[in-house]
Amino acid sequence: DAVLNPEKAKSKKILRLIPEQFSIKSEQSLYSRIQAVVDFISGMTDLYAVDLYRKMTGMQIPQIR
């Protein structure tokens, strides 16, 4: 939703979490913005994805021992 509606306040916060190298600008085509998100997600490690989830939700994922 953040890519579809980048002008919303929540969308702006989410898009700020994506590094500048993936450059998601509202003047880009929708395809280019979605491709940038896919590139970002495909490059994530598991640990980075969990850390980003925690930042976005403020939730902790219980550790399995």
Image: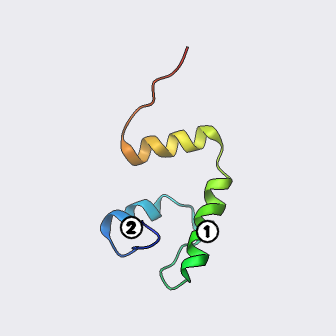
**Height in image: 29 above or below 21?**
below
User: Which residue does the image show at 62% across and 39% down from the upper left?
Assistant: 46
Question: Going 55% across and 13% down the picture, which residue do you hit?
Answer: 65
Q: Which mark is residue 12?
A: 2
Q: Position of residue 50 (x, y in %)?
A: 53, 39
Q: Quadrant of the rendered structure where residue 58 is?
A: top left
User: What residue sits right under mark 1 in the picture?
Assistant: 36
Mark linked to residue 58: none
Q: Residue at x 62, y 59 (%)?
A: 40
Q: Residues within 10 Å of mark 1 (few under 14, many from 20)?
A: some
Crowding at dot 2, Cα within 10 Å, few <14 / some 14-19 / many 20+, comes out as some
Residue 64 screen position, x and y as percent = 53, 18
Judge whether 47 appears above or below 30 on screen: above
Q: Earlier in the sequence, mark 2 or mark 1?
A: 2
Residue 11: where, in percent of width, then height? 38, 66
Cα separation between marks 2 and 1 = 15 Å
SS assignment at label 1:
helix
Residue type at tag 1? Ala
Q: Place residue 10 in its image quadrant.
A: bottom left
Q: Quadrant of the N terminus?
A: bottom left
Mark 2 vs mark 1: in front:
1
Residue 38's x, y, as percent? 62, 62
Left or right: 64 in relation to 54: right
Q: Going by the picture, which residue comes out furthest to the bottom? A: 27
**Residue drawn where x is 56% and y is 44% of the image:** 49
Disc 2 marks a residue whose amino acid type is Lys
